[in-house]
Amino acid sequence: MTKTDLDSQKFHVLILGASYGSLLATKLLLAGHDVTLVCRESTAEIFNKEGSIVRIPIRGRDEPVNVRSLDLPGKLCASSPDKVLAPKDDEAKSDKETFDLVVLAMQEPQYSSPGVRELVERIASSRLPTMAITNMPLLPYLRRIPGLKDGVSSSHEIRSCFADPSLWDAFDNPELVTQCSPDPQAFRPPDEDPNVLVVRLPTNFKAARFGSERHTAILRRLEGDIQAARYDGHEIPVKLRLHDSVFVPLAKWAMLLAGNYRCVAQYPEDMVPIRDAVRKDPEASRSVYEWVVSLCTSLGGDEGDFVPFEKYAKAAESLANPSSAARALKGGARSIERVDKLVRAIALQKGMETEVVDGIVVRVDEWILHNSE
């Protein structure tokens, strides 16, 4: 495909995850591209009938704006996992040629659920370029990290951090997998239909380039189209930002270990808000934050890839609730994304350790053990 063809092409993006995924979907639809959203069949029926609604704050307006997919130039289609990339009854091939990009926008343990697991396997065999929007970088992406690429596949300690590590073995070409940091904060209001998403913190998605320029060009085009798009004359926040460094999407690791996972209290105590976890002992927060940054730089990252602690601590002042991981554990979850465990496993490979992270892992393990009884 030539650059001229790429500049004029309307892309079709497959997104797994109708909650967080509907935010990126809305940005793509606003930019004129088509999206297929994978979700439960009952949820898909609502999306296909009523479209999606993303409620988002914009500069210069007191009330958030409801961005409705039915009003956007792109086309939204929702489907259950079993109907996507499946062989057609009347032909021997699947519909993989209709997608230009796959986005994995669910939490890592969810990909092991029935139906979704089989779809992920079909995605791997399709060899479509795949971008994960997760705090937990998937195993194929970790193989793109300079200081890790030779020790990921054989490391039991790293593989054990994933709910189903064998699922990711089928992605045998890490150049086809990239990572995007889920920096924007959004949630589904419990008293509204599942096609409604409320954006609490409208920051940007930060994606690393693919291994090939051909696939990176797709992200670059989407980045520009999202930047240029307007809704009713207004610029809508939450952009897609493309970076050359594979470490940029990992910048959130330090934030997660300094704040989100330190919300997890000793079982069975109540979880604490992120801001309290950070400001209760600012020096301890700074220490673990900078320890994680130093781990990433030891793998080949540059300090410029990471947010300074002071900027993070200031932003954390507005985070008045416990993290989603802490809330999930308190609610009885038997599995969550184990970024805490992954960071410790990688650190041990580099001969680094800290009691703070060790303590986090022990507390999370304890909650999961009790929730599983």
Image (tube, rainbow, N blue to C red):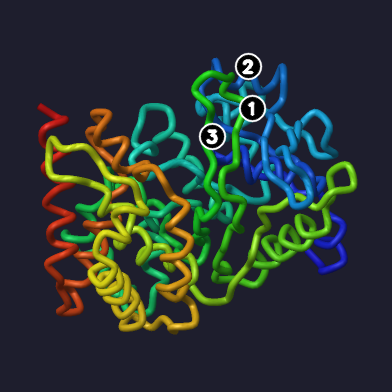
Q: Residue at x 84, y 49 (%)?
A: 234
Disc with the residue nearer the chain's start (3 vs 1): 3
Label 1: how many Cα within 10 Å (few below 14, some 14–19, many 20+): many
In front of the other: label 3 or label 2?
Answer: 3
Q: What amino acid is labelled 1 in the image?
A: Ala
Q: Secondary structure at mark 1?
A: strand
Mark 3 and mark 1 in contact? Answer it, CB < 8 Å: no
Q: Is residue 133 left or right of residue 101?
A: left
Label 2: how many Cα within 10 Å (few below 14, some 14–19, many 20+): some
Q: What amino acid is labelled 2 in the image?
A: Glu
Q: What amino acid is labelled 3 in the image?
A: Ser
Q: Secondary structure at mark 3?
A: loop
Mark 2 and mark 1 in contact? Answer it, CB < 8 Å: yes
Which one is in front, 115 or 351? 351
Disc with the residue nearer the chain's start (2 vs 1): 2
Disc with the residue nearer the chain's start (3 vs 2): 3
Tell me where residue 42 sits by quadrant.
top right
Q: Which residue is mark 1?
A: 78
Q: Which residue is mark 3?
A: 19
**If the image is split into quadrants, where does the C terminus sit?**
top left
**If the image is split into quadrants, where does the N terminus sit?**
bottom right
Q: Which residue is mark 2?
A: 45
Tell me where residue 313 sits by quadrant.
bottom left
Q: Secondary structure at mark 2?
A: helix
Q: Is residue 273 left or right of residue 4?
A: left
Between the C-alphas of marks 3 and 1, the distance is 12 Å
Q: Is residue 372 left or right of residue 48?
A: left
Between the C-alphas of marks 3 and 2, the distance is 15 Å
Q: Residue at x 41, y 54 (%)?
A: 135
Which one is in front, 218 or 313? 313
